[in-house]
Image (spheres, helix red, strand yellow):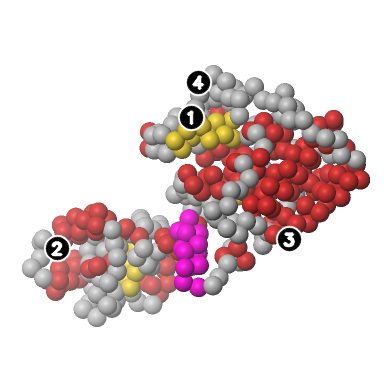
Amino acid sequence: GVEVPGEIEKQIQGRTRRYQDRFGSEEEENAWLRRKYNFADTDKLFCIAGGLHSYQGIREALLERGWKEHREYDSMIFDLKWTVKTTDIPFKALNKDQIVNHFAANSHVTTKVGLTRNLRNLRWFEDVDMDEFFPRSYDLHDPEELQDFVDDFKMVAVENVLARYIESGAEMGNAFGVPLGDLAERSVQLALLAGEAFVRRCNVLDLDDEADEDDNGLTPAEWGLVLGEPCPVLARAGPAPKLPTAGGSDANPHVQQAESAQAKRQRTVGYRPFGAARGGESKFEAGDSDEARARKLKKIPDGELKKRASALHATLREMSTQRTLNGADNIWIVKPAGKSRGRDIVCLNSIGKVFDYIGVGVAGKE
């Protein structure tokens, strides 16, 4: 049988009951509807839910073929029903000869998050690596996937720091083209530390072995230097952290939209920009911070530094099945939940802007 959530089925039954309660049988309802619209007993009937001007192409094609349209949208008397929403179709009540334009529970494969989750589960049934044919995707409403996205974003940033140094040397800029000056070598060394720690962690065969320190050995301030912007920090776990309300939201309609929906959001994890002060303003300036300079690093000759950067960059590229997707700018496609047809999809290369756009809770402020 077709699985339909109980609440949805109740809503459908409620809408159709006003027709069903009026008639003693389906045959009686069928006769009443055909008399009302002056349809012959042999006419094929269709119904298009969504208004008189919806799906004109479908309507015209059916009418040209001699089909008849009625507008009893909640009636079960039809040969074909075409709707915008899946919830307008009572799947459990359909006869075998009735046609509809939706499949029950199709969100498991027709939404990006549904398809992603099912492809991940595929490994339990088939020896298939989804990374070989499906781009990396994360549901940023899920706390664990949000953390996975942050980790992925950071490692792509590491790879890009190494690539910029290999190409431009000490004249390199950060992720946004701002010259790093005397911080160029430090950013490369920090990228080396994080990248080499990541490689070691990936090569640990025994899961009980102790891995490197958290976050691949870098502090939030050091990550900020690698990223070229304040680094998100896991602030705390707790119920319903507040959404961002400062830092340019007035100029960003997407952030305003997220803020207006905050009563509907119940997040279980919060992030804040590193060093966020009261009022939400960051004391961290992209590309520079006393804390980012705190670690004592040995001077490495340019030739050796470039050699190590080249070797690590090649290793990271070799390890990544999707290395051709990473690009040089760390750009991610961000799609709002619950919207279709490309509405409000944006491309962002700033993790801070990603967080602003999706309305991630800001927590942990003292």
* Labels 2, 4: front one: 4
Work out whether 298 lies above or below 131. Answer: above
Type of residue at label 4? Glu
The numbered dot on residue 20 is: 2
The residue that disc 4 covers is 366
Q: In the rendered structure, which disc, 2 or 1, sits on the residue that comes first in sequence?
A: 2
> In terms of secondary structure, where does tag 4 sit?
loop
Measured Cα–Cα span from mark 2 to mark 1: 52 Å
Answer with left or right where residue 51 lies relative to residue 166. left
The part of the image, by quadrant, that contains residue 154 is: top right
* Residue found at the far top of this picture: 278
* Labels 2, 3: front one: 3
Residue drawn at 54 percent across, 44 percent down: 147
Q: Circles 2 and 1: CB distance less than 8 Å?
A: no
Measured Cα–Cα span from mark 1 to mark 4: 9 Å
Q: In the rendered structure, which disc, 3 or 4, sits on the residue that comes first in sequence?
A: 3
> In terms of secondary structure, where does tag 3 sit?
helix
Instruction: Kindly tell me whether residue 72 is visible in this rendering.
Output: no
